[in-house]
Image: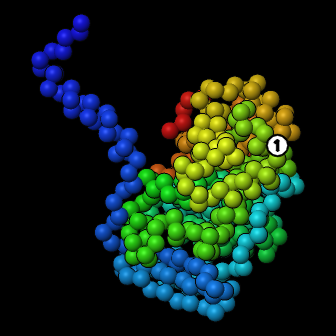
Amino acid sequence: MTTIRPSFRHLLPLLLMLLASGPALAAEPPAPAAHVDADGPYVFREDGRLRARWICDDAVQEQAWDAAQATVPARCGYAHPVAVALPAPVATAVLPQAPRIVAVSDIHGQYGLLVKLLRANGVIDGDDNWALGRDTLVIAGDVFDRGPQVTEAFWLLYGLQQQAAAAGGAVHFVLGNHETMVLYDDLRYVNPKYLRSAQLLGRSYPQLYGADSVIGQWLRTRPVLLRIGDTLFLHGGISPEALQLALDPAATNAAYQASLGRPKAEVKADPATAPLYDGKTSPIWYRGYFDGRLDTAGVQDVLDRLGLKRIVVGHTSMPHVSSFHGDRIIAIDSSIKKGENGELLFIEDGRLSRGLLDGTRVPLAEGRIGQDD
């Protein structure tokens, strides 16, 4: 029989209590901030009208329009006017090859760093307008959570999508796991600022992105799987177990879009949606390319079965945009969430490079299995 030494016996109940309470404590969202300096706009469609609400010095301001489209002025929060368009159509899952694609992921509320990175690499100009002409920008998920400028990042991308389309280019936003988490009310990683915004606006934080909001409706039409030519873009990755989901990307995207906003327990218990949210194997959560679960031969088998040359993913944080498995997997979560640095992936007629924060272009970093953050 093992004897507990007297000097440690009194610590055992405390340790057991901490171990038992740890997961429950970790699951709790943060407390709301005491004050919000500036946030917004949050724009809602109400009976054919638009209503915008801002938070300015911890007080709500609002304005309404008797129209389905309007230009919402800059007031507090996002520094540019917002051109609110008609409700967005459902995004296409499969697109033809594009000569030049720029990709980034896991912005996590670091709007200022995102703007600096896009300006330095000629994606936007000094006034934050689209400057990439007929080329393509892909954002591989996770604008929500952690950082203090989620609202600004969403409006920037929403506006750039309209500007790019007018120029003959394209902006594609691919949903990440943090988009689904916020919408099914998992608020563990929400910046406290936004919980205070929600209090002031009289809605829960997920309701600020409900189907009646402009950004919420836009999110509900975005893909999880986006194929452009011979490259598949998604947030987490395609596991062998979830290969069937990638064989019919339009159906998988539709299933995700229909499930957004449903309670977490419900989507995980429903056999029709459980594979979409499996924390180990689903397209928004998979990390098997980097943790040793899938070797290069396994990756090549996935590519062969899908008819792809490469898969580009975010979700698993790296110090740099990195190549794994001989350029078969490109990891583009360059740890922007830390607010210190970030990189872009460039795919130009099949050639791969990365754009740095100073605008320099260099080869991809060589990834090492198990190096993620």
Taking the spot 66% from the left edge, 73% from the top edge, the residue there is 159
User: Could you tell me the amino acid type at mark 1?
Assistant: Leu
Q: Pointer 1: what residue? A: 247
**Residue 356 visible in the snapshot:** no
Please tell me whether residue 358 is drawn above or below residue 297 in the rendered image. below
- Quadrant of the image occupied by residue 288: top right
Q: Position of residue 104 (x, y in %)?
A: 64, 54
**Left or right: where does residue 201 sit relative to residue 41?**
left
Q: Toward the viewer: 20 or 156? A: 20
- Quadrant of the image occupied by residue 327: top right
> What's the image's color scheme?
rainbow
Q: Residue furthest top?
A: 1
Please tell me whether residue 85 is drawn above or below residue 164 in the rendered image. below
Neighbourhood count class around disc 1 (C-alpha, 10 Å): few under 14, some 14–19, many 20 upward: few
Q: Position of residue 358 (x, y in %)?
A: 58, 56
**Residue 199 visible in the snapshot:** yes
Element marked by disc 1: helix
Taking the spot 48% from the left edge, 54% from the top edge, the residue there is 186
Q: Toward the viewer: 343 or 158? A: 158
Taking the spot 79% from the left edge, 30% from the top edge, the residue there is 300
